[in-house]
Image: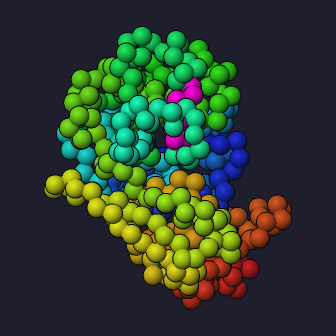
Amino acid sequence: MRVIHTFSSKNMIWKEQMYVMFLSALYAKRHYGNINLYCSNKQALQFDKLPPVYTSIDASTVTNDFEVYSYPKLLAYLDQKEPYLHIDHDTVLYKKPKFGKVPFKFSHPELKQLLKRPGNLGSHIPLLYGGDDDDYNYVKKSYIELFIKLKDAIPEDVRKKVDFEYIPNMNVTYVDDVKTFNKAVTNSLNYYNKNKDIIDSHEFGAHHIEQFMIHQQLRTLSKDYRKSLKKGNAFLQPKTPLALAMKSMKKLAPSIKDTIFPFKFLIYRNCECCKRVSILKNKIDSPESIKDYFGYKFNGYTHFSFMQWYQIWQVIIINEIVEEFGEEYVIGIHKHFREKYTKLDIPIISEGELLYEKLSGNKYFSGKKLLV
């Protein structure tokens, strides 16, 4: 099966992004024998100077001329002619997942867990439109605002079947029925082009044209997809793979020095046999105890999302690359950024790299051979 990454940005790929991107690519290549990158010329030039990891790099399909960050990903989808798996560059498949006989499969439902809160639908509606609850505010901003603003522009057949409960998080996107999926993507892009100014100006426009609109199109186009949603077969698991309670979120900071310990996070585990969900509670007591999570596989896969920038995870990611794939990858990434970061007056050794050296004893970033 063909496996894909997409990365297109008006900026270069930064070091924190590169580490998790390499880990994601290396695991995908181990599982499937290939990993193919769609990116702009600016990003392709970076990979010319790094240890080889990608099977192929396509720098002609997507560009860096866009406003919503999911747009290049939709272009990459449309370029596929055979069943494929697209994983976001910040998603790591530690274990090869089983997709089964379904037309499409995604990571997990984005919003369904909110609907499990006590109360009937009527009691939830005021919180979705007002209130100060952070989760409800996220739903309102990311999915409801643009739906309300553009509901008359949404095709009638799609609007009649609109579903919020099963909107998927597409950090993992498995496509077996390529023809139907491409039609859904094409319809979403046509809709986007007609309403571009409104969507581009909204902070969650990327969610709207990908996770919201493609899902709604698939529900309209595919009876098999509707069946798989009802049977619970359209997702790898029913909840987000990596979760932080709001209290923990407030403790977490990009800098380890600003992170308040102990720091807790949750892993949701989905049993492949009975589909029962259990919760793995984890706690990191201090910067030194990050070492306890060296080799941790996050129950098979995880999505670091915005947390890819946070040095507490960078330490774990760097160690995983070294232990599973070899030191040459992290040394190559670090060397690539030394000159760039010197010119930008950014510390050439990150906080995560320094703590990794301290915890592991491996001087890959401050050693003398890097000064040559």
Left or right relative to 324: residue 8: right
372 relative to 322 in the view: left or right = right
Q: Depth check: 81 or 189 in front?
A: 189
Q: Position of residue 113 (x, y in %)?
A: 38, 46
Q: Relative to 135, is 164 on the left or the right?
A: left
Give percent across and percent down for residue 334. Answer: 65, 69
Specify the quadrant of the image occupied by residue 255. bottom right
Query: For the N terminus, which image quadrant?
Result: top left
Report if residue 85 is visible in the image: no
Residue at x 76%, y 61% (from the top left corner): 340
Q: Position of residue 331 (x, y in %)?
A: 60, 73
| Residue range (magenta) | 136-146
Front in this rendered view, residue 340 or 139:
139
Pick the residue in front: 290 or 90.
290
Q: Residue at (24%, 41%) from the top-left corner?
A: 232
Would you say the magenta stretch is mainly helix, strand or loop?
A: helix
* Whether residue 33 is visible: yes
**Colouring rule applied to residues:** rainbow
Q: Is residue 221 above or below residue 132?
A: above
Q: Residue at x 45, y 12 (%)?
A: 155
